[in-house]
Image (cartoon, rainbow, N blue to C red):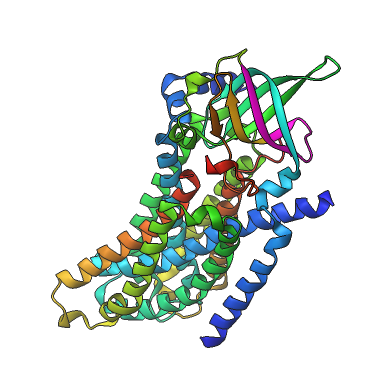
Amino acid sequence: MASILPALEWLEGLAWTTAIRESNLGYPIMETSHVACIVAFAGLVMVMDLRLLGLAFARTPLTRIQRPLFRWQMSGFFLSAATGLLLFVVDPLRYYGNIFFRVKLVLLALAGLNALGFHLTTFRSVGRWDEDRLVPATARLAGAISLFFWSAIIVTGRLIAYNWFD
Amino acid sequence: MKTKIIVALLTAGVLCAGQQALAHHAFAAEYDSEKPVTLTGTLSKMEWVNPHGWIYMDVKQPDGTVQKWTIESSGPGPMSRRGLKKTDFVAGMSLVVKGYQGKQKPTLANGRTLVLADGRSFYIGSVGGPNDGADKQ
Amino acid sequence: MSQAYRESLWLFAVTQALHLVAVSGFVGAILIVDLGLLGWGPARQSQSGIARSAQRILLWTGPAVLVTGIPQFTTNALRYYASPVFAIKMGLLAVALVFTVTLRRRVAAADGDRLPSWVPKAVGAVSLALWMGVTIGGRWIGFSE
């Protein structure tokens, strides 16, 4: 398999990525936006996971929460991913070699699979258990897994700053 | 409700007390505040990047050998605000850096003060270093 | 000796990371109510129940945010004292807290028909701006030396 390092070096050498990497304001704005988007998006996912676990909003039908929030969660995710991609592209070699970044990507994939799995299976029958305080066990499990993964994603994301394993 | 607040305050209090052990957090585990260094040498390369800059310099030892040092500095924003420019760093130029030596890596340092050949002196430290007065400039 | 220092670095870094997790939970509970007030979230009739539940989440995550945030503050207290960004963040936090426990709480719990429609929208917008301001200010401290 061809190494992607030459492509990453090319990205790093571009004028606009270099400019942002060396900027006074550009990089701080991008990184702060990334953090703000993640906090908002993950926060909305977490409160919904709490509903799945029956720990919050238990008297509100799940879909009354999930349906209106879904578009905000998706927008938040896409903005987080877009700012994240920009951050990566601006300093690709640094992140490529960073263990926490790699772990974060794996966790993101796993979190996505958990969400997709839940939507394609248990959630299909939501009409039957929408108003239950205690939802089916598989739904509760999906909520618990989601809460764990998104917390882990935030933690590994923050730890990227520490290059202890260079 | 009241119990929760009391527990929170107590935990906070314990954490504050534990601060003595944590010393200067991230700084203390990577760099030794008991091992200040003054490095005189020539600039090999300067990475003027976010979130931290990196100064690579060659430091001639008394026995004639050359040690290659890596110094962590603040990012472009803080350095620019103090009057430094990327163009102030020219490969081969003489410079003096004062900082603190790395714990696991002996030729790594956390930079605090930079003195250029023209005599100008700048604070290049990041948040968390010891209170040695370097940032009063 | 270096083992202890290594462990203390982990402790600080993980505490800082958990601060972000707690902030996310807190902001999520704020957002679900604010989105409802703005008319972009859960329907009007569900809102007062959601607001009560959200308040419980705030009471759990709030102290967690505080406790995980304090180590960062105490190790930098002298430098933060002089930082305008830190002062702005704390100012916004104070305003946000007062606003949330007074006006916003009453509006979120109120019956939908008793208030002119612009009131919940304005309260939701102000709350969103204040709390996102605190979040953004918190991150910006690291860039503002």
Query: Is C118 on the left or on the right of B85, as rendered?
Result: left
Q: Quadrant of the N terminus of chain A?
A: top right
| Nearer-the-camera pick, B84 or C122 | B84
In this picture, is C133 found above or below C109? above
Residue B87 sits inside the magenta stretch: no
Quadrant of res A60: bottom left
- The x, y position of residue A135, in whole percent, is 50, 75
Query: Is B92 on the left or on the right of B78, as rendered?
Result: right
Q: Quadrant of the C terminus of chain A?
A: top right
- Res. A80 in view: no
Q: Which residues are magenta?
A: B94-109
- The x, y position of residue C75, in whole percent, is 61, 57
- The x, y position of residue C111, in whole percent, is 22, 83
Question: Residue visible at 59% across and 56% down?
Answer: C16
- Res. A59 in view: yes
Residue B97 sits inside the magenta stretch: yes
Q: What type of secondary structure mainly makes up the magenta span? A: strand
Query: Is C23 on the left or on the right of A61, as rendered?
Result: right
Question: Residue visible at 45% across and 45% down?
Answer: C144
Question: Residue visible at 54% across and 44% down?
Answer: B136
| Nearer-the-camera pick, C86 or A126 | C86
Number of marks in picture = 0
| Nearer-the-camera pick, C90 or A105 | C90
- The x, y position of residue C17, in whole percent, is 59, 56
